[in-house]
Image (cartoon, grey):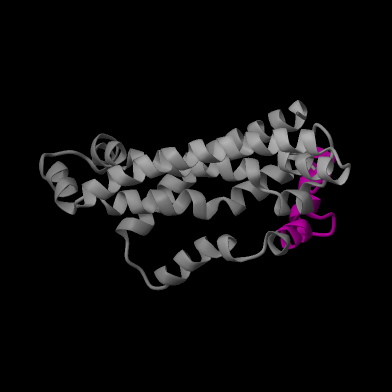
Amino acid sequence: MDWEALILSIELGIATVFGLAPIAIWAGRALAYREFRGKGFVEALVALPLLLPPTVVGFYLLVAFGRHSPLGQAFEALTGHLLAFSFEGLLVASILINIPFSFQPVQRAFEAIEPSIREAGAVSGLSPWQVFFRIELPLAWPGIVTALVLTFAHTLGEFGVVLMVGGSIPGETKTIAIAIYDRVQAFDDRSANIMALTLLAISIVALGITNTLSRRIGRRRG
């Protein structure tokens, strides 16, 4: 077991969850409650990382993070090192590719809340913020937890984008998914199997949690 790679993957997963959670709650709620021109296009854009090959996404992110891009130049001027092939670059890439895994469950959770419940809170004298914190957020919580679990699990297993943007720098960008690939390349099947089983166990637990929470949302819709 490559413990350094596993710990780095967990750190990346936690950072991605914390980075995406507030954005996903805000964007998911907005997509659930607001109707606007181009909403279908925005929803398609949110789902785009699910359809594009990871190498395609990774390539364009690598270009965007590179030394010749405005973003890469600004980051290098501030920090003294490149955004590409760094943990910070890996984190930004992870946040972007996990948008559909975080936005969509949150949106569905807010959509499942009956409008009459929200209206009753407003009629009772609650402010919009009070309605959000006292009514909407507790009812949407299963979807929010689902989004967080899926984001964390997907971050641990992501390979293509991570390899393109971060490379395989031990202690900096080498995640457990890349460590598995390296062990297979070195014909170390035993180590690769142990790490693969670890990711498999995490995925099974994540699916169990998301299925349980999805059933709760479905019962509320019914």
The region drawn magenta spans 58-85
- 152 is higher (above) or lower (below) than 100: above
35 or 196: nearer the eye?
196
66 or 205: nearer the eye?
205
Q: Is the magenta stretch mostly helix, strand or loop?
A: helix
Q: Percent from the top left, x then y, of residue 94?
A: 64, 47
Residue 21 shows in the view = no
- 25 is higher (above) or lower (below) than 205: below
Q: In this view, does 41 lie to the left or right of 130?
A: right
112 or 125: nearer the eye?
112
Residue 133 shows in the view = yes
Q: Is residue 84 magenta?
A: yes
Q: Does the magenta stretch include residue 134?
A: no
Q: In which quarter of the image is residue 16?
A: top right
Q: Residue furthest front?
A: 190
Q: Which residue lies furthest to the right in this view?
A: 186
Image mark count? 0
Q: Check the picture and name the quadrant holding the N terminus.
A: top right
Q: In which quarter of the image is residue 209?
A: top left
- 100 is higher (above) or lower (below) than 9: below
Q: Percent from the top left, x then y, of residue 74?
A: 77, 49
Residue pictured at 71% horizontal, 33% vertical: 194
Q: In which quarter of the image is residue 89?
A: top right
Q: Percent from the top left, x then y, of residue 154?
A: 58, 45
- 69 is higher (above) or lower (below) than 208: below
Residue pictured at 23% horizontal, 47% vertical: 219
38 or 167: nearer the eye?
167
Residue pictured at 64% horizontal, 44% vertical: 157
Residue pictured at 64% horizontal, 33% vertical: 198
